Image: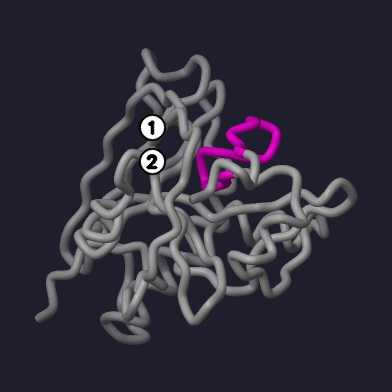
Amino acid sequence: MKRELFIESLRVEEGHFQNSGRHYRRITDTLRECFGKDAVNPCPFPEDAMVPDDMRRGIVKCRYVYGLHDCKIGYQMYVPRRIRTLRLVEGGSIDYHLKYADRSGLLALREQRGDCDDILIVKNGELTDTSYSNIVLFDGRRYVTPRAFLLNGIRRRSLLDRGAIEEQKITPQDLRYFQRLYLVNALLGIEDGICLEPADVF
């Protein structure tokens, strides 16, 4: 029996989970893809009532690790990383379409960042993701996200479904046409303002 572990990072805001339905669907889809159509989640999905009393103020990260027979839930106050520079790296054959707890492939790529804060991964000549986020670019009029991605993240899907962003092919050479590059994931939205200028991508 396979023992893969997967992870969900959920945003808890003032004691309330955000985008719970999308996280639950991704967990269900992951288990079924890996373990068969009858696979079910072996542990309770986080609910507001489960948030510890000392984690009910501000933005909290819930780390939910699971597998076919495993489950572990932890909470910590969330402080966004300060990302000022990105290094373009070639992703090669890396596959992260499921949110594996084992991030060794991504970490190996991140070792190529040099003196930059993180990496921006290129596959087949197109921009995809950083080591921990999807990206959204702003050209002065529209917000767009690469059609290529390693992980179709929760925030990315939500923004696309709402029509807040558009999807298109974006190459490294296209960066010059944009004013801002935002990092987005389940914990970070465009409104959180974690962004760089294209000149900060090397």
State yes or no: residue 187 in magenta: yes
Residue ID at (38%, 32%): 50
- Highlighted magenta segment, given as a residue range: 183-196
Q: Is residue 111 above or below residue 90?
A: above
Residue ID for mark 1? 50
| Spot occupied by residue 165 in the image (x, y as percentages of width and height) | 77, 57
Q: Is residue 50 left or right of residue 145?
A: left
Residue ID at (24%, 52%): 111
Q: SS for tag 1?
A: helix
Of the 4 image quadrants, the one containing the N terminus is bottom left
Callout 2 amino acid: Cys
Distance of label 2 from label 1 (alpha carbons):
38 Å
Q: SS for tag 2?
A: loop
Q: Residue furthest bottom?
A: 36
Residue ID for mark 2? 116
Residue 63 occupies quadrant? top left
Q: Is residue 69 left or right of residue 195?
A: left
Residue ID at (76%, 49%): 138
Residue 33 occupies quadrant? bottom left
Q: Residue furthest right?
A: 141
